[in-house]
């Protein structure tokens, strides 16, 4: 059962890593705007290639 | 079917969605309501940005007048506006009120397509802000703003931006504290479980390990997460005053000390689980209380209204100067549509001032040379020259904000703080009684444990939670109906109000649904002539009238002349036609009213277009519901609408006209000195002083993104008729808080029963606290919903 000492240490360490990750995320402003990125990802990429393709076919 | 759709879509402007006038603008087989909308479309299509119209139908907004941007060339002003500047790149953040949909995000994040000197732009949708980084060698700040203006996204650059107060809605440190408290609570719970389930002899070796771990976790819980409670308690004790934080700090201290003693001396498991749980819940309640609206600013003052720079004349040369730097004796050059930023004397030019900011009366006032023009007046005629007689911050209007009379916040005592005093007293009485009893029994160990247990169990945690939970639930109910209250404390103030003061213009009447009425005689043929003339003007009044006339064709005209702020004249089919102010007309008209747009065709007076403001709908039904309150109407306007007010309001309502901003402020003060709690409803800068002084100031607006003066709440004009229900719900909210307090006392009695006997086992405390918390939170939420339903708000 002495393995528990090690496991408890591990679990606390893991939790601390996650806490530190949250601190980092929060301080770098990743939670400042949680709405806009959701809209942004729905925009389609610009279809620039299409035109040149059309030209290709027509010529 | 397809044809029908076509007709339906054809009836609106492709850009802004406004109804199309009979004569429309066309480009690439799309219809537009005005030249402005068409110009935006052309720019976008030239730059391959027509995706803008793909994500939403008619995403644009109608075009506003041009504004003067010369001040953006001043290096001093640029430096104040920029967030960051390095070598060739600069970063700036603008507030753009027009941002409202995903198309806006798409377009503004593709600015680099319009001008390659713009590196990137990023939008924060809720805050309506865009952060742009650009190459300032290739594009000046002024050009950047011009680019934004051209596509219909005019940034709002005001004095308020310069004095950047980057205070987030929620304290950043609080969120981090909640994260830490959550982490601590989770871990401590984990280490306490073996204790709850009972330890077998074999596992006893871990007991001290878990104990010490719990104690270690308690230290940051008490001294990092709970630090604010200690500082708040100490300051309030210094002022010989007990607030809710005082007993909370005491409990945190006692919990920590007892845990430390029990762990160090190995006498028990301690109360680390209760301590961390308590701190976590308390911080959650605090967070709920601090949450507020991102997109609404409640603390606006004159700085938001005023531009950041004004043109001064120095040795006859125009030079833009930041408003803060204006000194007495400076010569100002105020163009049509610009605001006078400081009290000044008219030196040159013809001044027709729109003083609606100051007085609420929108008809322009004529000022003669040498007359004083107060700050806040807007010039509606040609450019004028003024000499400043008072600095901006001490002018007549801005002085309203620097008035010393304003309520001091310390007298605002909420229900919680007043209860906390008696609560703490009661807890101490019980705690000392129990200690005394056990000391008499010569059981010092039990005396100590009874004393600490009573304090732990009698935690006013519920009190600290029920208020934010109830009030924030009420806030979200209000929010859905278009009533945005600043914070939870303001809801308590709302419930206490007994006197309501209304402003008239813009509050009881609506500026948006203004109705154009024509007094006089006009034929259909003449209507077309008038519309053809007005079509050339960008004045909002002209647009309103054209819309009202709704003609299907226009004549071409010659000799067109516009005297800014006064009127228009031109020749159509050989007839000379005038439209505008009385002084503009070629003939003397004695009988007509002064305001309005007067029409003269071929030297014959035809009549006058006037804007009649419409009373907000539902007013007649709403006012009787407010009969329990003391009502007053203070209007800055003339008494021409008195008869209408008399029919809506009852006889004992005080109705006063021609009230200056200072008179309004004094009226509120006087009522407060008589012991009344005053709620003020107003809309403009002229009400700003009264709004700030009142116990609960409500700014009424038709568009929540447009500017409103500093206030406690912003109410959408269309939701005004819900006002009695809003007040009732806030009163019910206080009832809910009191009821939840009774429930909390019931729980406390159970806990105290164990505690005084000195037999409180940590498990009981650890179970009792979450149960009572869950009960209270669900009670307040359900009760709020029930009351909201009863008041027909959901």
Image: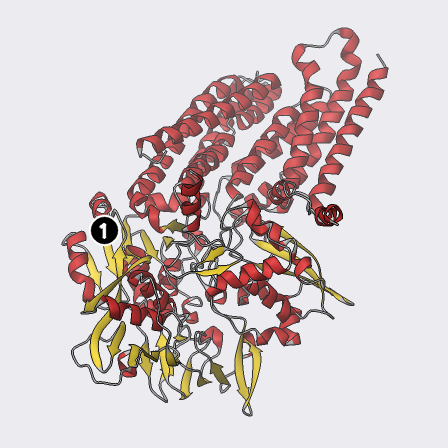
Image quadrant holding the N terminus of chain B, namely top left
Q: Residue furthest bottom?
A: B315
Picture layout, residue B227 above or below residue B146: above
Q: Nearer the viewer, residue B700 or B379?
A: B379
- Under circle 1, the secondary element is strand
Picture layout, residue B310 above or below residue B428: below
- Give residue A54's position: percent from left, percent from top: 71, 47
Residue annotated with mark 1: B630
Q: Nearer the viewer, residue B530 or A40?
A: B530
Q: Residue furthest left?
A: B651
- Residue at 48 percent across and 63 percent down: it is B63
Residue B126 in sight from this viewpoint: no
Q: Please report, as a chain letter, where disc 1 is located.
A: B
Q: Residue furthest top?
A: B201
- Give residue B584's position: percent from left, percent from top: 30, 82
- Residue at 38 percent across and 31 percent down: it is B736
Picture layout, residue B732 above or below residue B237: above
- Give residue B593's position: percent from left, percent from top: 20, 74
Q: How many numbered circles does the render carry?
A: 1
Color scheme of the displayed model: secondary structure
Residue B243 in sight from this viewpoint: yes
Crowding near pointer 1: few (<14 within 10 Å), some, many (20+)?
A: some
Which quadrant would residue B188 be assigned to in this image? top right
Q: Residue furthest front?
A: A59
- Give residue B680's position: percent from left, percent from top: 33, 55
- Residue at 33 percent across and 45 percent down: it is B496
State left or right for residue B217 relative to residue B375.
Answer: right
Image quadrant holding the C terminus of chain B, namely top left
Q: Nearer the viewer, residue B748 or B49?
A: B49
């Amino acid at each position: 059962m002495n393995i528990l000492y090690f496991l408890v240490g591990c679990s606390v360490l893991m939790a601390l890593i996650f806490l530190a990750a949250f601190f980092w995320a929060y301080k770098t402003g990743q939670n400042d705007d949680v709405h806009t990125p959701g809209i942004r990802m729905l925009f389609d990429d610009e279809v620039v290639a299409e035109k040149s393709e059309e030209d290709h076919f027509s010529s | 079917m397809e044809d029908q759709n076509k007709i339906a879509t054809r009836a609106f402007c492709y850009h802004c969605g406004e109804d199309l006038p009979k004569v429309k603008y066309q480009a690439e087989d799309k219809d537009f309501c005005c030249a402005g909308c068409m110009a935006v479309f052309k720019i976008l299509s030239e730059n391959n940005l027509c995706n803008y119209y793909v994500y939403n139908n008619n995403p644009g907004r109608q075009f506003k007048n041009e504004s003067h941007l010369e001040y953006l060339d001043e290096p001093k002003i640029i430096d104040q506006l920029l967030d960051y500047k390095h070598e060739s790149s600069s970063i700036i953040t603008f507030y753009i009120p027009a941002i409202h949909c995903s198309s806006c995000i798409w377009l503004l994040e593709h600015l680099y397509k319009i001008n390659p000197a713009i590196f990137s732009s990023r939008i924060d949708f809720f805050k309506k802000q865009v952060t742009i980084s650009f190459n300032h060698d290739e594009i000046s700040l002024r050009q950047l703003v011009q680019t934004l203006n051209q596509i219909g996204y005019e940034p709002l650059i005001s004095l308020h931006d310069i004095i950047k107060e980057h205070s987030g809605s929620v304290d950043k440190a609080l969120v981090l504290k909640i994260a830490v408290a959550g982490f601590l609570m989770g871990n401590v719970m984990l280490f306490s479980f073996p204790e709850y389930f009972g330890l077998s002899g074999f596992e006893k070796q871990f007991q001290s390990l878990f104990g010490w771990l719990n104690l270690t976790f308690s230290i940051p819980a008490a001294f990092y997460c709970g630090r604010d409670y200690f500082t708040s308690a100490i300051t309030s004790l210094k002022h010989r005053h007990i607030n809710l934080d005082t007993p909370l700090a005491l409990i945190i201290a006692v919990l920590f000390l007892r845990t430390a003693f029990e762990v160090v001396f190995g006498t028990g498991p301690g109360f680390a689980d209760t301590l961390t749980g308590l701190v976590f819940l308390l911080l959650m309640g605090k967070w709920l209380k601090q949450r507020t609206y991102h997109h609404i600013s409640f603390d606006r003052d004159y700085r938001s209204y005023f531009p950041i720079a004004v043109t001064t004349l120095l040795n006859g040369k125009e030079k833009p100067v930041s408003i803060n730097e204006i000194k007495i004796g400076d010569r100002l050059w105020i163009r049509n549509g610009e605001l006078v930023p400081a009290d000044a004397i008219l030196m040159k030019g013809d001044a027709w001032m729109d003083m609606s900011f100051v007085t609420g009366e929108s008809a322009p006032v004529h000022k003669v040379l040498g007359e004083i023009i107060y700050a806040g007046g807007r010039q509606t005629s040609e450019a004028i020259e003024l000499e400043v007689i008072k600095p901006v911050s001490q002018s007549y209007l801005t002085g309203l904000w620097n008035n010393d009379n304003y309520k001091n916040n310390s007298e605002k005592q909420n229900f919680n703080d007043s209860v906390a005093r008696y609560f703490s007293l009661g807890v101490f009485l019980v705690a000392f009684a129990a200690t005394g009893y056990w000391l008499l029994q010569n059981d010092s160990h039990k005396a100590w444990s009874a004393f600490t247990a009573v304090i732990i169990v009698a935690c006013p945690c519920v009190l600290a939670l029920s208020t934010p939970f109830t009030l924030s639930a009420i806030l979200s109910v209000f929010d859905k109906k278009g009533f945005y209250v600043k914070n939870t404390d303001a809801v308590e103030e709302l419930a206490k109000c007994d006197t309501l003061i209304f402003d008239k213009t813009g509050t009881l009447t609506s500026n948006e649904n203004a109705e154009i009425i024509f007094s006089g005689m006009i034929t259909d043929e003449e209507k077309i002539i008038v519309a053809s003339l007005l079509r050339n003007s960008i004045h909002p009044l002209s647009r309103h009238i054209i819309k009202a006339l709704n003609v299907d064709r226009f004549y071409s005209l010659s000799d067109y002349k516009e005297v800014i702020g006064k009127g228009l004249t031109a020749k159509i089919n050989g007839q000379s036609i005038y439209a505008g102010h009385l002084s503009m007309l070629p003939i003397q008209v004695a009988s007509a009213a002064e305001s309005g747009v007067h029409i003269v065709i071929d030297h014959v007076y035809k009549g006058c277009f006037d804007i009649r403001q419409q009373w907000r709908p539902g007013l007649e039904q709403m006012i009787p519901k407010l009969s329990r309150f003391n009502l007053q109407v203070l209007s800055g306007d003339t008494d021409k609408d008195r008869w209408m007010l008399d029919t809506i309001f009852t006889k004992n309502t005080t109705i006063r006209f021609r009230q200056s901003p200072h008179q309004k402020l004094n009226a509120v003060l006087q009522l407060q000195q008589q012991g009344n709690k005053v709620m003020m409803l107003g809309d403009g800068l002229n009400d700003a002083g009264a709004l700030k002084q009142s116990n609960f100031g409500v700014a009424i607006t038709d568009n929540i993104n447009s500017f409103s003066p500093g206030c406690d709440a912003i109410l959408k004009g269309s939701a005004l008729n819900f006002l009695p229900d809003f007040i009732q719900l806030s009163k019910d909210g206080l009832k809910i808080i009191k009821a939840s307090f009774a429930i909390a006392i019931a729980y406390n009695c159970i806990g105290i029963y164990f505690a005084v006997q000195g037999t409180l086992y940590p498990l009981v405390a650890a179970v009792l606290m979450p149960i009572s918390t869950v009960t209270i939170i669900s009670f307040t939420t359900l009760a709020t919903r029930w009351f909201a339903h009863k008041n027909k708000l959901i």
